Amino acid sequence: MDSVSSKRNKYEIDMCNGSIMDKLVSFSIPLMLSSILQLLFNAVDIIVVGRFTGSQALAAVGSTTALINMFINLFIGISLGTNVLAARFYASGKEREMSETVHTAITFALISGIVMVFVGLFFSKVALGLMDTPEDVIDQSALYMRIYFAGMPFFMLYNYGAAILRAVGDTKRPLFFLIISGMVNAGLNLILIVVFHLGVAGVAIATVIAQMLSCILVLRCLYKTEASYQLRFSSLMLKGSYLKQIFQVGIPAGIQSTVINFSNVLLQSSVNSFGSVAMAGYTAANNIFGFLFASVNSITQACMSFTSQNYGAGKWKRMDKVLQNCILLSIIVSVTLGGGAYIFGPKLLKIYTSDAAVIQCGMEILLYTTVTYFMCGLMDLFPGALRGMGYSAAPMVLSIVGTVGTRIVWIFFVFPKQRSLDILFISYPASWLVTIVLQVICYYFVRRRVKKK
């Protein structure tokens, strides 16, 4: 093996040969750490702005989160389509198709990023107004969003570049890039807010510079490789046939994420009806829940990439083994972390608040969301495997019907008859169970169809 190929293969994982479980773990852990670090760096933003600028600035930054997520979810979903298509071409040795997919995806990322800059500039204040953002923070919230969206091209390019690296099994380098950019972000926060007193603008500027750094690092990585996913800016293109395949997987994934976020907004409204103590308990519990999601979602991403590569290589039996191993790994991780989150719940919730009533509300919520979280992991694995085979529309519809549909029925018909946090949050495991049943049935029929092909 020459030095170039050994260097090239150092970060890649051979998903189509050899043992599966150790490779799934090797793929998932850096991805898990990346997601957790991202959450921690976001928490640093909020802590610094809250401690050194005050509650108005904290409210201004916090009030933009749901809106920013709503705007970018669709594009992040589309990056999953890039991951699936690139993994398939890479495993089947189609170098020209792989290269054209990479250049089409990066071009689309750049164009969508530029479009989002203008969306942020012209629609931030209007959207914040529609969300009834209070008058005393709306100007600061709009300023934060406009600066944040100015960095959207960097954000998009990083995410699509990282999706290409994940497709070949490289989750380690995106983790390194995130550690570097996250540390720069935290350092800039302190300099711009504490030293230069830039407040909300300082947090946004620090975020944009950190995103620019991670974007440069991931593009440099793609540029320097000698493999088929090498990036050349002179070869950037927007080829319709690849874009169509990326969209077929990516757009349903993005829509699913957006609609499920909408069901969480409905749930938040129901929590709000219990008053500020319950709201504070839900906020703290939801933050702990975010770390659980980040950990288990990395296994779903692994399932999708491994399935896609083995689908491209025509290794059907190995594809089934990938799902079986992912189910086992997901249950182990979610039961361990979910059980741990509940057992140590009171201590974890004390990080957020010292109010005993808030901690009690948080524990009521954690009982139904963490102990049963293995069901959520299973619910997401089957759509991950289906997307890996190129089937994305059906799992999207079933996830929306199962998760969102069950929660809407629960919130409007079950919950009003016996109003309590217990009854409200049973909707989580109930919706996960319904969706698992639907997704397993769907997977069975799709897998039969693939076998016949």
Image (spheres, rainbow, N blue to C red):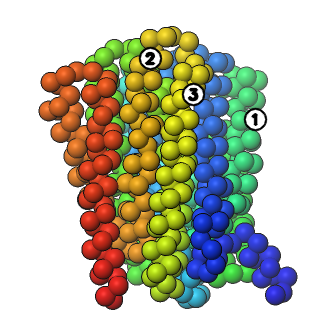
Write the residue at 65% across / 65% down.
22
What kind of residue is marked 3? Phe
Residue 344 circle label: 3
Residue 360 circle label: 2
| Mark toward the viewer: 1 or 3 | 3
At numbered mark 2, what does the secondary structure look like: helix, strand or loop? helix
What kind of residue is marked 1? Gly
Circles 3 and 2: CB atoms closer than 8 Å? no
Q: Which residue is mark 1?
A: 187
- With respect to residue 123, does 402 lie above or below? below
The x, y position of residue 116, in whole percent, is 46, 52
Picture quadrant of residue 453: bottom left
Of residues 163 and 152, the one drawn nearer to the viewer in this rendering = 163
Q: Of label 3 and label 2, which has the lower sequence position? A: 3
Of residues 23 and 69, the one drawn nearer to the viewer in this rendering = 23
Residue 409 circle label: none
CA neighbours of label 3 inside 10 A, class few (<14), some (14 to 19), many (20+): few
The x, y position of residue 293, in whole percent, is 49, 45
State the CA–CA distance, disc 1 to disc 2: 35 Å
State the CA–CA distance, disc 3 to disc 2: 13 Å
Residue 100 appearing in the image = no
What kind of residue is marked 2? Gln
Q: Of label 1 and label 2, which has the lower sequence position? A: 1
Residue 229 falls left or right of residue 101: right
The x, y position of residue 290, in whole percent, is 50, 39
Q: Of label 1 and label 3, which has the lower sequence position? A: 1
Write the residue at 45% across / 74% down.
320
State the CA–CA distance, disc 1 to disc 3: 31 Å
At numbered mark 1, what does the secondary structure look like: helix, strand or loop? helix
The x, y position of residue 117, in whole percent, is 49, 50
Residue 415 falls left or right of residue 282: left
Circles 1 and 2: CB atoms closer than 8 Å? no
